[in-house]
Image (spheres, rainbow, N blue to C red):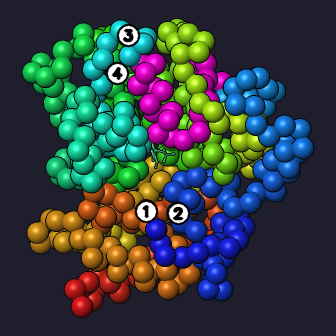
């Protein structure tokens, strides 16, 4: 929490109860891709509320059927069937159930630094924060390394080969391939510190999933809906998953999540095997449909790709001038990691100093990473060139001052 109370949001801006306005680089943690209070979403929601608000799975309804069709058109080609729920955690719980039902196996492999949610199954596959796992033990999920080229000082290809080699060792010593139901991965880790998995690593996972008869699950709850420069990061990377989970931006700001899967995978669940009272709520589905139309009309995935590439280059230049900083990301999902350059250790104090100096300039951002030392740039995708220019200028100014002065005053 930032400690701010918002009273109004419009486009990429938030107005707070203390009378300030902030350019929002958090976007409800990658949820408000369309910005705040998009008129198309408001109109669709008002209309739907006059038709029917809630059905709770007792009856089907047009907005849900239309949304499934619409998602089939924008998700990777492999994804054909959809199940609707309310939160990201719930979609991931469903993904694990579906994977176990479809393979008849129980083993789950997740990747170090992952965040898949705060419910028990999703938590078991979450390693980005020790506190999240308190009392859960291993929870039945096996943890393999996620490629970390920066940390190891090696290339993306070398880091992929290293992490895949470790996964092969995990299969050799801990979890046999024939016991493995699925690999579950964020194509770009969010909470873990904004780490892109890279195309080579995801292709290597695809190969192993095919070879071992396991399913590849992409958690696109944060990377989806245009954020990484295509509708989904699977398309940015050119790797098709068997199962995809979506939430956050899918509902245009309304609570909605979805699990998409190959038909034969979803067919492993029989009618009545799974459900959720508010899953596929008509108002949320109507908001989602209007949101997807607006994103398409405004070509937001391409906008994210172009602005994201320019922003990453600019933040990369900033990092080149300061040994404390490094920048990485994909599309408009960018992280600036802050380290103590001598100890090569996380410097959350310096990161916090930059965050609060940026806030003084009227720009709202948040941090991530297990040590809270990664500054996140996650603006609404409707942000304009000028707005992003202002935000990056504020980050540059704050970082230059903080890195020159140090944080320990
Ligand atoms: C990649 C990812 N998966 C799952 C979740 C959990 O979603 P929710 O908070 O809606 O349960 C999040 C939330 O931040 C996320 O970023």
Q: Depth check: give the residue in front, 320 or 334.
A: 334
Residue for badge 2: 26
Q: In terms of secondary structure, where does tag 4 sit?
A: strand
Q: Which of the two labelled residues, at mark 1 and mark 2, occupies the earlier sequence position? A: 2
Estimate the spatial distance between the alpha carbons at disc 1 and disc 3, rounded to whole Å: 37 Å
Q: Quadrant of the C terminus?
A: bottom left
Return the x and y of residue 240 as percentages of the image width and height.
47, 24
Q: Nearer the viewer, mark 4 or mark 1?
A: 4
Range of residues picked out in magenta: 72-99
Residue for badge 1: 376
Residue for badge 4: 182
Q: Depth check: give the residue in front, 22 or 229.
A: 22
- Looking at the image, residue 44 sits to the left or right of residue 338; the answer is right
Residue for badge 3: 103
Is the C-beta separation of discs 1 and 2 under 8 Å? yes
Return the x and y of residue 342 as percentages of the image width and height.
12, 72
């Amino acid at each position: 929490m930032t400690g701010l109370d918002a009273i109004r949001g419009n486009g990429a801006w938030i107005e707070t109860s203390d009378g300030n306005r902030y350019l929002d680089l958090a976007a409800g943690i990658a949820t408000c891709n369309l910005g705040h209070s998009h008129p198309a979403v408001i109109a669709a929601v008002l209309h739907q509320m006059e038709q029917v608000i809630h059905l709770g799975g007792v009856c089907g309804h047009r907005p849900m059927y239309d949304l499934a069709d619409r998602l089939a058109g924008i998700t990777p080609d492999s994804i054909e069937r959809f199940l609707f729920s309310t939160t990201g955690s719930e979609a991931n719980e469903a993904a694990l159930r579906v994977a176990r039902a479809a393979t008849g196996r129980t083993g789950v492999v997740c990747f170090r630094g992952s965040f898949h949610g705060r419910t028990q199954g999703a938590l078991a596959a979450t390693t980005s924060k020790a506190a999240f796992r308190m009392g859960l033990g291993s929870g039945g999920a096996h943890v393999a390394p996620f490629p970390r080229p920066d940390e190891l000082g090696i290339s993306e290809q070398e880091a992929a080969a290293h992490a895949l080699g470790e996964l092969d060792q995990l299969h050799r010593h801990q979890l046999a391939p024939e016991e493995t139901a699925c690999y579950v991965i964020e194509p770009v880790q969010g909470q873990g510190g904004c780490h892109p998995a890279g195309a080579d690593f995801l292709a290597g996972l695809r190969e192993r999933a095919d070879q071992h008869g396991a399913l590849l699950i992409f958690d696109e709850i944060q990377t989806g809906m245009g954020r990484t420069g295509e509708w989904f990061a699977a398309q940015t990377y050119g790797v098709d998953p068997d199962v995809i989970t979506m939430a956050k931006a899918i509902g245009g700001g309304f609570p909605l999540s979805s699990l998409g899967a190959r038909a034969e995978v979803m067919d492993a669940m029989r009618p009545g095997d799974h459900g959720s009272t508010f899953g596929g709520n008509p108002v949320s589905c109507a908001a989602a449909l209007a949101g997807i139309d607006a994103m398409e009309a405004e070509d937001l995935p391409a906008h994210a790709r172009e602005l994201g590439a320019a922003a990453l280059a600019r933040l990369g230049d900033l990092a080149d001038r300061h040994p404390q900083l490094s920048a990485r990301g994909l599309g408009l999902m960018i992280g600036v990691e802050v380290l103590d350059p001598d100890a090569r250790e996380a410097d959350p104090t310096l990161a916090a100093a930059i965050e609060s100096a940026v806030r003084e300039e009227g720009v709202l951002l948040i941090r991530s990473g297990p040590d809270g030392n990664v500054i996140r740039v996650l603006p609404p995708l409707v942000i304009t060139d000028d707005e992003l220019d202002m935000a990056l200028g504020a980050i540059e100014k704050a970082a230059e001052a903080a890195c020159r002065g140090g944080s320990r005053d």
